[in-house]
């Protein structure tokens, strides 16, 4: 799966509405005290920046401190929600990759449901959504799931852009030995069912066929396993897009606007990039123009994409109603 290229920081979403807010429970950084909205002083490459830990919780009320921290260390933002099962798959991968950079990145986890102002500021159309903040400015990265190797490559690009903007500090958690970034103490993670763990492990190493096989086996054992159903839909989407270039997919769809395979591909691409309504609308508009076999294919794909997005999502509910009206 091709990851999105990094845009220039100019034109990024404006978070200024959060800068002047009070920040109870804020993160104390090497920037010291400052007036609201005033950026902290830049740091030299490799300068230690004291933080409580490398994985922080971000909220609507404490994000001023996160913006301040992003002047010194690049911040990765994980927008998640309990209602979206794919978040449980992505968040541990993001944390693992961030910790591997040993303080060159900070991870901030934001519950999008409990912090709607941040979700709106980052223009999160769905969860999970992953973004970065550099020098107080947000940088959209991707929505949905991605393989660990792709995420690591993308974060390397974030670090390159951070260096160009002078954001080159090294975060050092409180209590870590001098010169070491350290890592937060991780709470115990409940054991997953064996086939679920097999699927997650395969996805992390980019072996999508093995992950698909594990999820399918789990569903054979328990057809009502909602997590397995969602996991299978998500990893199947990644597998369909693997090795395909975004530009090629969009060019093929533009050249053949009524081509079933071409439109299915671009709908997959839109969902993977967070353009959920565009993806659903594309297939629902195509649906009436197809023969019965084509309609069956589109219906099956839509039901699968509903699982990827989350069956309780309002956008999914609206699309499901449109599909029902088309069927009957």
Image (spheres, rainbow, N blue to C red):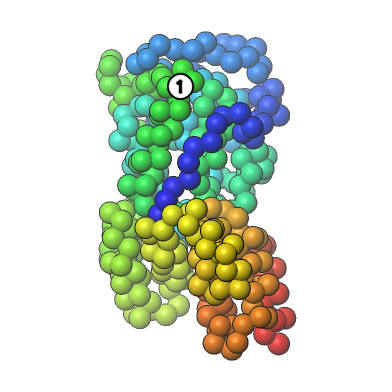
Which residue is more in the foreground, 238 or 173? Answer: 238
Residue drawn where x is 50% and y is 72% of the image: 261
In which quarter of the view is residue 7 placed? top right
Q: Nearer the viewer, residue 190 or 68?
A: 68
Horizontal side, residue 207 vs residue 68: left or right: left
Check disc 1 and report the residue beneath it.
164
**Residue that appears at 41% across and 19% down:** 168
Q: Quadrant of the N terminus?
A: bottom left
Query: How many other residues sit within 10 Å of disc 1, few (<14), some (14-19) or many (≥20)?
Result: few
Judge whether 263 appears above or below 107 on screen.
below
User: Can residue 278 be seen from the camera position used here?
Assistant: yes
x%, y% of residue 185? 33, 35
161 on left or right of 175: right
Q: Regarding mark 1 in the picture, which secondary structure is present there? A: helix
Q: Position of residue 189 (x, y in %)?
A: 34, 50
| Nearest the eye: 208 or 249 | 249
Name the residue: 57% across, 25% down.
136
Question: Relative to 143, does residue 102 appear above or below in the rendering?
Answer: above
Q: Residue at x 52, y 27 (%)?
A: 134
Q: Quadrant of residue 254?
A: bottom right
Give the image location of residue 9, x and y in percent: 56, 29
Residue 219 position (above or below residue 13): below
User: In the figure, residue 52 lies in which quadrant?
Assistant: top left
State the quadrant of the C terminus.
Answer: bottom right
Q: Image height check: is 5 above or below 203?
A: above
On the image, the x and y values in percent for residue 229 come to: 44, 71
């Amino acid at each position: 799966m091709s990851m999105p290229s990094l845009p220039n920081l100019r034109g990024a979403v404006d978070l200024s509405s959060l800068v002047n807010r009070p920040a109870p429970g804020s993160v104390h950084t090497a920037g010291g005290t400052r007036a609201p909205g005033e950026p902290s002083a830049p740091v030299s490459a490799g300068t230690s920046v004291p933080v409580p830990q490398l994985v922080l919780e971000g909220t609507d009320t404490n994000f001023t401190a996160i913006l301040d921290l992003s002047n010194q260390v690049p911040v990765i933002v994980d927008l998640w929600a309990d209602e979206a099962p794919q978040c449980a798959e992505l968040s541990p991968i993001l944390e693992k990759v961030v910790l591997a950079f040993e303080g060159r990145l900070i991870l901030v986890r934001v519950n999008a449901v409990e912090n709607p102002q941040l979700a709106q500021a980052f223009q999160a159309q769905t969860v999970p959504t992953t973004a970065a903040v550099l020098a107080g400015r947000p940088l959209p990265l991707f929505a949905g799931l991605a393989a660990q190797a792709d995420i690591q490559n993308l974060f390397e690009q974030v670090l390159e852009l951070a260096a160009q903007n002078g954001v080159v500090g090294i975060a050092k958690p409180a209590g870590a030995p001098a010169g070491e970034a350290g890592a937060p103490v991780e709470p115990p993670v409940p054991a997953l069912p064996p086939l679920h763990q097999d699927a997650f492990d395969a996805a992390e190493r980019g072996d999508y066929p093995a992950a698909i096989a594990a999820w399918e086996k789990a569903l054979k054992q328990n057809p009502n396993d909602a997590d397995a159903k969602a996991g299978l839909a998500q990893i199947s989407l990644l597998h369909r897009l693997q090795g395909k270039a975004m530009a090629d997919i969009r060019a093929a769809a533009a050249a053949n606007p009524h081509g079933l395979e071409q439109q299915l591909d671009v709908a997959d691409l839109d969902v993977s990039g967070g353009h959920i309504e565009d993806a659903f609308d594309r297939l629902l508009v195509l649906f009436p123009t197809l023969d019965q076999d084509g309609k069956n294919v589109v219906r099956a794909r839509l039901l699968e994409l509903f699982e990827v997005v989350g069956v309780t999502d309002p956008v999914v509910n609206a699309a499901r109603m449109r599909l029902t009206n088309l069927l009957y």
